[in-house]
């Protein structure tokens, strides 16, 4: 086509009686029309996404158990070398059938379009990083080689700029993974400590969510955060000095001590504690006294008053 000139032909007008039939052949009704969402990436390019909130509520799907963070991290317990592969547009590797493609239709000022492959934000994953590890050079390199071969077989593209090869520690889902264990990502800790005092219930819920995310690094969080959780459940939001001191105590109590990846082996100690509103059960590795904090609140319906 390099030697050909561009050509835009005029529309041939069919007989007037055929216009209705012509329209029926080239247009189709759409049961689902989603809103388009355009997101600017750090490099100033854009993602064209859809808002599938209503669509996801209507789709019937089988429930597949997903690994928890602890289950995913335990696979790398004691690894000396860790590699992180970042999948590039992994969702575009999934081709949609005709029925699925139709329900991804979205509105734009220029007409309606539909995705032929899985759109971004049309699915649910925990994280798109592929973590590979090894206790020795040979084991690590063999695992990475196998992963790369598998990725090529499945046409999975990688973002080389975001991949980390053969490191002794990597950031993963708000935590730092290393050979002896995990510790909080300094950026997460800084974000919590720099949070301003909440002025609404929604802001308080955001703060509590961040605290819960770092719960393994905050001893006795269930007990410490009780005043804030009670405030979140009250109709009237009234921030008082008690809440201010609670907020300060929690942000100052974040410890950066390691949580071991493999608490089962070696000498361990379980310490239990309870109050009228919470339970605590820290598990300690005795060699270096690295704690694994665990605890939870007691639901008001389960509290017995005497």
Image (cartoon, rainbow, N blue to C red):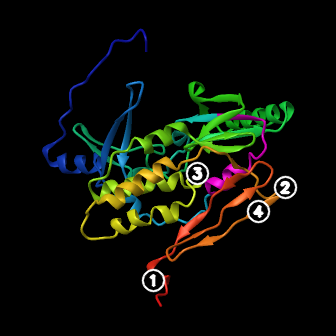
- Residue 210 in sight in this render: no
Q: Which element type, helix, strand or loop, lies under badge 3? A: helix
Depicted 169 relative to depicted 290: above or below: above
Depicted 194 relative to depicted 289: above or below: above
In the depicted view, which residue is nearer to us: 3 or 182? 182
Q: Which element type, helix, strand or loop, lies under badge 4? A: strand
Q: Which element type, helix, strand or loop, lies under badge 1? A: helix
In front: mark 1 or mark 3? Answer: 3
The residue labelled by disc 4 is: 269
Q: Number of numbered discs present?
A: 4
Marks 4/3: CA–CA distance: 18 Å
Magenta residues span 67-84
Whether residues under marks 2 and 1 lie with C-beta atoms below 8 angstroms apart, the answer is no
In the depicted view, which residue is nearer to us: 24 or 90? 90
In front: mark 4 or mark 2? Answer: 4
The residue labelled by disc 1 is: 301
Residue at position x 39%, y 55% from top?
Answer: 245
The residue labelled by disc 3 is: 217
Residue 98 percent across, percent down from the top left: 45, 51
Could you tell me which quadrant the N terminus lies in?
A: top left
Marks 1/4: CA–CA distance: 31 Å
- Earlier residue among tags 2 and 3: 3
Q: Which mark is residue 266?
A: 2
């Amino acid at each position: 086509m390099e030697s050909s000139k561009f050509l835009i032909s005029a529309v041939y007008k069919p007989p007037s009686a055929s216009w209705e039939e012509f329209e029926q052949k080239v247009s189709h009704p759409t049961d689902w029309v989603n809103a388009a969402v355009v997101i600017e990436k750090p490099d100033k390019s854009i993602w064209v996404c859809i808002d599938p909130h209503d669509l996801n509520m209507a789709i019937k799907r089988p429930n597949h158990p997903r690994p928890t963070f602890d289950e995913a991290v335990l696979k790398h317990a004691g690894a000396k070398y860790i590699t992180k592969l970042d999948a590039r547009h992994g969702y575009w590797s999934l081709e949609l059938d005709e029925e699925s493609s139709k329900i991804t239709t979205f509105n734009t000022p220029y007409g309606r379009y539909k995705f032929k492959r899985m759109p971004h934000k049309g699915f649910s994953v925990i994280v798109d990083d592929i973590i590979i590890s090894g206790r020795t050079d040979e084991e690590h390199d063999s695992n990475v080689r196998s992963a790369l071969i598998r990725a090529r077989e499945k046409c999975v593209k990688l973002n080389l700029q975001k991949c980390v090869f053969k490191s002794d520690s990597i950031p993963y889902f708000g935590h730092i993974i290393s050979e002896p264990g995990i510790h909080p990502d300094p950026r997460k800790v800084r974000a919590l400590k720099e949070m301003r005092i909440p002025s609404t219930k929604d802001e308080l819920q955001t703060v509590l969510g961040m605290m819960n995310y770092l719960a393994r690094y905050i001893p006795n969080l269930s007990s410490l955060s009780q005043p804030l959780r009670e405030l979140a459940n009250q109709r009237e939001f009234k921030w008082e000095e008690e809440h201010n001191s609670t907020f300060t105590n929690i942000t100052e109590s974040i410890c950066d001590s390691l949580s071991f990846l493999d608490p089962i082996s070696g000498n361990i100690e379980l310490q239990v504690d309870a109050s009228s509103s919470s339970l605590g059960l820290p598990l300690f590795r005795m060699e270096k006294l690295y704690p694994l904090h665990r605890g939870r609140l007691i639901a008001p319906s389960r509290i017995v008053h005497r």
